[in-house]
Amino acid sequence: MQGDAYLKCINPKCGLEYPVESTNVQCTNGHLLDVKYKKIPPTDLKEVFYKRRNSENSIFNESGVWRFRELLNFCQIDTENFEECSKYLVSLDGAEGRQSKPYQMSKAADFVGISTRNLWLQPEGYNPSGSFKDNGMATAVTHAKMVGAKKIVCASTGNTSASAGMFAANEGIDCDVYIPAGQIAPGKLSQAYQFGAQILEVNGNFDDALKQSLEDAQNHEGYTVNSVNPFRIEGQKTIPFRALEYLNWEVPDWIVYPGGALGNTSSCGKALMELYEWGWIKKIPRIAVINSDGASTLSDLYNGKFEDEEIRWNKGNPNTELISRYYDHLDKQGIKPKTKATAIQIGRPANILKGLRALEFTNGVVTTVSDSEMLDGMSVVGLNGFDCEMASGASVVGIKKLIAQEIIKKDDVVVGILTGRQKDAMLPVEYHQNPNNIFANPPKN
């Protein structure tokens, strides 16, 4: 298939290119790949996207992913042809991203120390499987279907397995899920079982599970749907697309994400790079990544807490040896990622290089927050009538910390991404039963 879309290595010194049908997640030199487009989308598509909010009975207009299909048309189809869309594009009846948009939450704004009009929080937990993963899974499984894959494969701390299982069941294909034994919230694991996924337990953590899943995909004709897959990143670009569209394409000062495998950081960076290159935006928002104290790889490396050297993308020449030495240090010291926010309990972020690229492009920052702080952030979102999981609380308290440090100014406009809904039922129960917690509402006798 010749056309507009192709794959390209992210390393500027390498730059190897592959056809869009390729299932490689790396180039032959071991670098991650980007989906690239030759044509520049015209800005009048903004009006098309706005009109599609009235879906006119098209699930692809309803979809918060495929409503922006011209900006991720790696299938190279006629995007106005409903039959072609139905043939190629995978959708859960238009539900992925459909209800995801930024909201103003007054109690959360008061808590972080900013005016309500300047803080927007975008709950991705309203996706059908309950997390942001559905945005990227729609596009990853679309590509899997395009290349005729019979089985999708992933490693998961929970949300990926739920999303992959849901899409696989809907499309009638097999799904293998590698999980770190005993480290997944039952509410997330039950979803994977419910959707018929084959669970494979790994003695280790998420990083070990990812390694085994990639070996499965490579050696047993599976199609990997973790965020190392460049086509999954395409779908996750629609998270900032929706935020920007809702703000009438007036760019905020900050976009804030929890930091796990860094697929969201990478996808946001790619979205902003493309929009800026295409002339869709004139200003570049800054990205803030919020790690857990117990899974702080990016923060440690970015802020020079290891060997007193700050890791940077460095225009495509990052010091990857520093990353390797850091990982060796973790192994020698027996340090494993540890946080109750299991969604971001990741010690070796698979997308760290794309994440560094995004931070360089946006002049971004990285910081950490504690488990107790994340629980506070999760709880104050709940007091506004919205649901989010503990890892999503990182965005809220990360914003609070950066405001206190005067890195985020009080007149800045900030969009925080709430990546998933609550699936660990005991976390809020335990939080509210402890009267020492800020927002505790313990039961009365």
Image: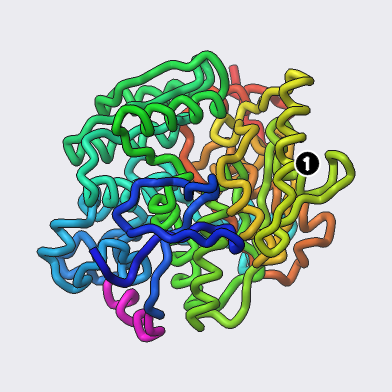
Give how far across and how far down residue 72 sits, in percent.
35, 65
Q: Quadrant of residue 383?
A: top right
Q: Which residues are magenta?
A: 41-52
User: Which kind of residue does numbered mark 1 sit on?
Assistant: Asp
- Residue 49 colored in magenta in the image: yes
Residue at the far left: name it.
Answer: 83
Give how far across and how far down residue 136 sits, in percent.
39, 50
Label 1 SS: helix
The answer to whether 221 is drawn above or below residue 118 in the figure is above
Q: Residues within 10 Å of mark 1 (few under 14, many from 20)?
A: many
The answer to whether 200 is drawn above or below residue 141 in the figure is above
The answer to whether 275 is drawn above or below residue 13 in the figure is below
Residue at the image position 74 percent from the left and 57 percent from the top: 113
Task: Evaluate whether residue 156 shows in this view.
Answer: yes
Residue at the far right: name it.
Answer: 308
390 left or right of 20 in image: right
Q: How many marks?
A: 1
| Residue nearest the observer in this picture, 13 or 314 | 13
Residue at the image position 52 percent from the left and 13 percent from the top: 203
Mark 1 sits on what residue?
Answer: 300
Residue at the image position 32 percent from the left and 44 percent from the top: 128
| Residue nearest the observer in this picture, 158 or 87 | 87
Residue at the image position 85 percent from the left and 41 percent from the top: 305
Give how far across and how far down residue 114 sits, in percent.
71, 62
118 left or right of 37 in image: right
- Residue 77 colored in magenta in the image: no
Q: Quadrant of residue 68?
A: bottom left
| Residue nearest the observer in this picture, 379 or 301 | 301
Give how far across and how far down residue 401 sits, in percent.
77, 50
Task: Evaluate whether residue 383 shows in this view.
Answer: no
The answer to whether 420 is drawn above or below residue 186 in the figure is below
